Amino acid sequence: MSATEQDRQNEQQRVETVVAEISKRISELKEQVKVVSEDIVGIRKHFWDDVTVNFEDATEAIETYVSIKQQAEVLSERERSHRHALHQLRTMQRLLHSPYFGRIDFREETEPRSERIYLGIASLLDKNDEHFLVYDWRAPISSLYYDYSPGPAQYDTPSGVVSGEITCKRQYIIRDGKLLHMFDTGVTIGDELLQEVLGKQADSQMRSIVATIQRDQNRIIRNEKSRLLIVSGAAGSGKTSAALQRVAYLLYRYRKTLTAEQIVLFSPNSLFNSYISTVLPELGEENMQQTTFQEYAEHRLGDDFRLEDPLEQMEYVLTAKDQPDYAARLAAIRFKSSTLFLQVMDQYAKRLMQAGIVFRPIVFRNRTLISAAHIHELFYALDTSLPIPNRMSLVARALLAEVKQLERRERTQPWVEDEMEMLDKDAFAAAYQQLRRKKQFREDSFDDFDREQELLAKRIVKQHFQPIRDFVAALQFIDTKATYEQFYANPQLLGQLLPDEQSQIPEAWPAICSMTLAQTKQAQLAQEDIPPYLYLQERLEGQQTNNLVRHVFLDEAQDYSAFQFALIKSLFPRAKMTVLGDWNQAIYAHAFHNESFGTVASLFEPQETETFVLTKSYRSTLPIVQFTRQLVEGGERIEPFNRAGLVPTVTKVHNRDALAKQIEERIQKLLANGHKTIAVITKTAAEAEQAHERLASRMPIRLITTSTLSYDTGCLVIPAYLAKGVEFDAVIIYDASSASYSEESERKLFYTACTRAMHELHLYYCQEKTPLLAAVSADSYEHLETDQ
Ligand SMILES: Nc1ncnc2c1ncn2[C@@H]1O[C@H](COP(=O)(O)OP(=O)(O)OP(=O)(O)O)[C@@H](O)[C@H]1O
């Protein structure tokens, strides 16, 4: 069935009817919000007028209590109703702009006629609250729209499967109450609307995709069964989009039991957090909690160590190749992030059950009150089959009892008397008052000088001992740092802890050990040491788990090490996990030898796990995807979305000055072509600074660094690893010469940078172009050479 002019007129009329209904609701809701807020102000103002306060006897007091309670309930009911009306009002305001985006005509098997289902970002009932003028895109019936072409179709409902036939499927672009376009579609969500959406200019914030969710993405969004959902997808295939619409779906599906605070998204960096932060509010939902692994590590270890940032580590890997310990450091990064090392740490923790944990003594005024050896003895006297954290709690309990004894004995120490003499009048008066108060319940006299002295001593010692009690309760007698260091102090130990003798250990292990110790001695922890350190800490002190969180999302999951997966899983024992990533974008050194989601999959039972693969790339034009997919192994499996555009260019320039001039000219052209966000992507932060310096004298351009929290449209210079997950209208690769991208290990970073482009991609190089372009066929880009 194709859309005729008559159809179009009917549809425009329907839009107008629905918009009129929405406008009416908006006025009603505005009035309601006004009335309710006036009520609230009134109740708050006159709260006590309607309450009879009388505490003369128990009956009166109860009546007073009941009357206050009633009044408070009226107030909180009004407040609830205000929140509800406001929420409804906001939803209606969002619908007013574009009330729906799709329609299916569905005839249930048992019905003679089909029903028209219009889909929008929220539900709208007619004025009698009987029929849906618009269905929420997350309603069970709406899945038909995403999953089927016209023909036989079915959907799940809580009471079973409903089968029937889709007789028409239509898409609309409605803006400000005007029907701009409509398309009838045969296949899933037709190309026209996607073309329209994807052809737009990039924003500094991500947009929702509910109008054009593809079938494969819908399966991810609506999956409810798996404890672990793994999504492996090409650059630009909509992994992040699917994750965010999934959050919105879950909040709708479980709206009675699930709140946004019970969902946590781990993302690559703060810039990315701000990039995605508008999607859920656009859909009328609150944002989930957003964090990064580094933020979590800072929270746990930030007081004890200066933690290296993942981006500092990255900058080192990319720029410190000439340093003498570079090879050892790289080996350390890879080894310490591997599953093998996770097993080694596990073995180490098991061995610590029998012997070897280092303890801190309990020291008071430079005197050892309880020696480390004594704590060691207490700990290892306990049943060795008990988990370490349980034994630690028992030790803490025993220590607190000992501290109590010691505290009593301490009262007779000369320093206490000295301190008493130093007490000023006020302190004496306070002690006296305290004694007086206590005296009411005692028989002996408060005049008793000795007793006053005794109580003052008790008070003084108690005050001084409080930090000791805190120290014990916080298990600070465990010296995790020394226990971690002890593992490196004896490089031979590793051999004894390997799960099997064939395991490969780095040749540079002794050097790695010294390097690690040199850092920890200065209270610094390298990025690769953070997960194993945290892991050991958890094994010694016990988990700091969060039982409230029900869903954890890990975006850019290829950047997580085996350790990080294991830690995150154990932190949220009651949560389902959605893990999304692309191995072609595994830019961190620890990921080079860890090319699958096997590690994370092994954390759950196979029957609890489902894996989805997204192969179609939506972000970039056809020529850009045809270019970028040749950069990576297996790239032929990446399917471009058929959107026309200019072929990428690769331009040779003579020197750095010429480079800046050429880039400036390119940017002017891009701006003239209507592109809004243009990113000059460099390999490193150091290079970004240099590029910015050269370009900033020629045009307004912003430098993005690790401390940038958000960005606006415009021109920017950004290092590749900060551009992760983000996209731009046009990308300029600042220096694609062989001097810059020379190593195979930089391929993924280079690929990540190039795949940030939506509409145009331009690469520049001096002298030789990078060997990473060798496999790219010459007809997939335009080679340009300048005479400058
Ligand atoms: N179904 C869709 N409809 C419209 N746009 C889509 C759809 N799927 C993806 N996109 C668009 O494609 C672009 C890339 O999506 P997204 O960032 O979610 O991909 P990704 O797989 O996370 O990418 P990367 O791994 O490269 O960061 C975004 O602009 C997104 O809006």
Image (cartoon, grey):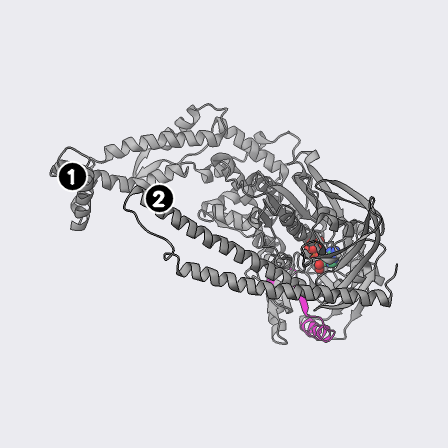
Which label is found at residue 288?
A: none
Q: Does the magenta stretch include residue 531?
A: no
Q: Which of 754 and 788 is in front in this view?
A: 754
Residue 649 visible in the snapshot: no
Q: Which amino acid does label 2 sit on?
A: Ile
Q: Is residue 683 above or below residue 675?
A: above
Q: Which quadrant holds the N terminus?
A: bottom right
Q: Which quadrant holds residue 679?
A: bottom right
Q: In this view, does 758 lie above or below 465?
A: below
Query: Crowding near pointer 2: few (<14 within 10 Å), some, many (20+)?
Result: some
Q: Which of marks 1 and 2 is nearer the N terminus?
A: 2
Q: Where is residue 676 in the image (x, y as percent from the top left)?
A: 68, 70
Residue at point 63% right, 66% down?
717
Q: Is residue 93 above or below residue 266?
A: below
Q: Name the residue under label 1.
A: 452
Task: Give, as a single range, the part of the protein colored magenta.
Answer: 657-686
Q: Position of residue 341 (x, y in %)?
A: 60, 37
Q: Where is residue 421 in the image (x, y as percent from the top left)?
A: 16, 45
Q: Which mark is in front, 1 or 2?
A: 2
Query: Crowding near pointer 1: few (<14 within 10 Å), some, many (20+)?
Result: some
Q: Which quadrant of the render holds ligand 1?
A: bottom right
Q: What residue type is labelled 1?
A: Glu
Label 1 near ligand 1 (CB < 8 Å): no
The number of numbered badges drawn on the structure is 2
Label 2 near ligand 1 (CB < 8 Å): no
Q: Is residue 660 magenta?
A: yes
Residue at point 20% right, 43% down?
434
Q: Mark 2 points at which residue?
A: 62
Q: Nearer the viewer, residue 102 or 241?
A: 102
Q: In this view, does 787 lie to the left or right of 714?
A: right
Magenta stretch, main secondary structure, is helix
